[in-house]
Image (cartoon, rainbow, N blue to C red):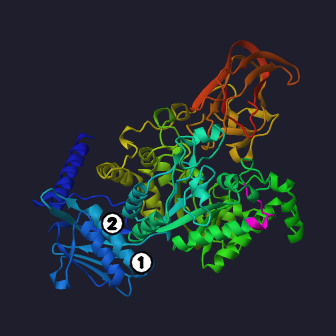
Amino acid sequence: MTKHRANYSLMKLVYFFILSLIFVGCKDAPTVHRIIPMPQSIDYTGNSLKLSKGALFYTNLEGLGKSDLANYLELSPLGLKLAQSASDADVIFDIVPSLPDSLNVGGAYMLSINKNKIEVEAKNSAGLFYAVQSLLQLADIHTNGTIIFPTVEIADAPRFEYRGLHLDVSRHFYPKEFIKKQLDAMARYKLNNFHWHLTDGAGWRLEIEQYPELTSTGAFRPYKTWKEWWTGGRKYCDQNDPNAEGGYYTKEDVKEIVEYARQRHINVIPEIEMPAHSEEVVAIYPQLSCTGKPYTSAEFCIGNEETFEFLENVLSETISMFPSDYIHIGGDEADKRGWAKCKKCQRRMKEEGLKDVDELQSYLIHRIQAFLETKNKQMIGWDEILEGGLAPNAVVMSWRGENGGIEAVKKGHSVIMTPAEFCYFDAYQDAPVSEPEAIGGYLTLDKVYSYNPIPEEVKERGHLIKGVQANTWTEYITTIEHVDHMIYPRLLALAEVAWTDVEKKDWESFREGVLKETVWLQANGYTPFDLNNEIGERKEAQTPVEHLAKSKKVIYNSPYSHHYAAAGDSSLTDGLRGGWSYHDKRWQGFLNTNFDVVVDLEKQTDITSVTAEFLQLSGPYIWLPKDVTISISDDGIKYTELTKIENELPTTYDKYIVVPFGWEGNAKGRYVRYQATSCGIDGGWLFTDEIVIK
């Protein structure tokens, strides 16, 4: 055995000696950086190229593409300057008529660095730009102006054509320079669609000249944070009010941001919410709601023709600002009860032969899509636009899991995957007790990285899945530093999901690359989450718990929600405790109902304790029970109460907390009944993970 160890040690010495010859053997050997996202093919050839900052480059691009590239390169850390001929240049960027078949997609490029020069080939300017991003990550830039590159051959192309980041600026407003900073990072990681959530109940952020009150009033509120607005009356105020908080983007701001994005090959997609999430609009123009009164609704009245006049006018003005082929119309989370009571909506349904309010919403979606098509625009909406029948040619953004996307693909629609489980960056990325406040959930870097946007069910029609997007909702994200903290480094994982083929991904390599890339982010003014100090998953979830009820039958006297079924009927006795997230398929959820179950221990059993844990997190409407009652029975009919526990934590407590409710003592029986009373808030959830009996 000792001999084998000695041989192994010798092999390691030889291996590291060879590496030293390859990467460290010369004075100017480069640091080999891990490119994010990982190229489809990369081959380091063991030498280096040294350039000086301000070296010359040549491109056969013409017109605007040429000036864009020249400006970007000169202002970049490489500082490259445009040469008049290829013979004078150290770096060549060429548009070519064709690339190998494996690179026959938009944005593909080939990059070659040898000991003498750098050569890049692509079929379009986007491909050249993405090659620049790889060069920037490969470059080892010294303070004396020397830049050292490893010699390398790269053949690269994106897996998906749509690679997106969404930012909600309604709940909290962020200045245009901050938006530009996000566009810079998107460009570095080869993302190409910025989904700008400009309107929602918490504030209208886009100047519309025809309706100036949308910004003079709808963009401001007398509350500093979204949470204060949500709990304090949800009112708006004039922008000149001394307590006004908020802001909006002028047409000049939008023009500047759209152009800044264009230069980085990023498309900016505006979202104008409808028919719901429109409290700010119908508060200012109450005639557009079903009630006709301000502060009584969040939905447009679909039976009112003036609603469509307003929406078409707003969309026309929006389209004049955004060259994007896509316009996002929201379409999510409508409270349709008001339509069922509204005379105008009911008349519309009768006239159009609509059988229910789902079809009424679909009427609006179809009509808005038809209008957008007259403007040569394509509609995107959240997956609720499927309800009542989807408009032809609409693109579905699937957020409530993947089912909406799967359904849309099966019907022949294009889809962008953005399921909350993998893509919602408003979730905690580490232990909630250690992180700034978030809406809930638990989404780690490795969970994002693990996502494959093409489900097995529609693999053969995977071409209809156009891409994937990270969504950053900002109800609890009040500062630009907090936004950065939530987006980075998780956006790097999403970027690699969007760009790199599954078989080319490698978690360990990626994580090491992220640790180094975090240094770049910090040096360039971002405030990312510190992966070095990650706490990780809740310790109770890491080891199965052994107890008397494990694998025993559970009888449900109240039903669990199919949305949060966990492992179904076996969840509460499978020995698995929940983690930080109620999305983890271990926590079982009960909506608008008390919790009432019976565990059958199969025989008379001596017991000394019964405990279950419950979760409280007010953002997603999850509360502890009002009280808990634990009882025992020999026959499953007549029960003896062991304890009743009153909950002392108020529903106003708004931090993440897990609380055990249990009994200890001595008892004997076959059936254990565990009852928990809902706090009574409409839409409220109870979540528990395991009934532990010892």
The prevailing secondary structure element of the residues shown in magenta is loop
Q: CA distance from mark 2 to mark 1?
A: 17 Å
Q: Position of residue 62 (x, y in %)?
A: 32, 85
Q: Secondary structure at mark 1?
A: helix
**Disc number placed over residue 269 in the picture, else none:** none
The residue carrying mark 1 is 103
* Residue at horizontal 21 percent and vertical 59 percent from the top: 140
Q: Position of residue 527 (x, y in %)?
A: 37, 46
Q: Image check: 668 left or right of 239?
A: right
When asked about the image quadrant of residue 606, the answer is top right
Residue at figure coordinates x 50%, y 49% from the top left? 447
User: Horizontal placement of 186 versus 278: left or right?
Assistant: left
Looking at the rendered image, the disc whose residue lies closer to the viewer, 2 or 1, is 2
Magenta-colored stretch includes residue 354: no
The C terminus sits in image quarter: top right
Q: Which residues are magenta?
A: 299-306
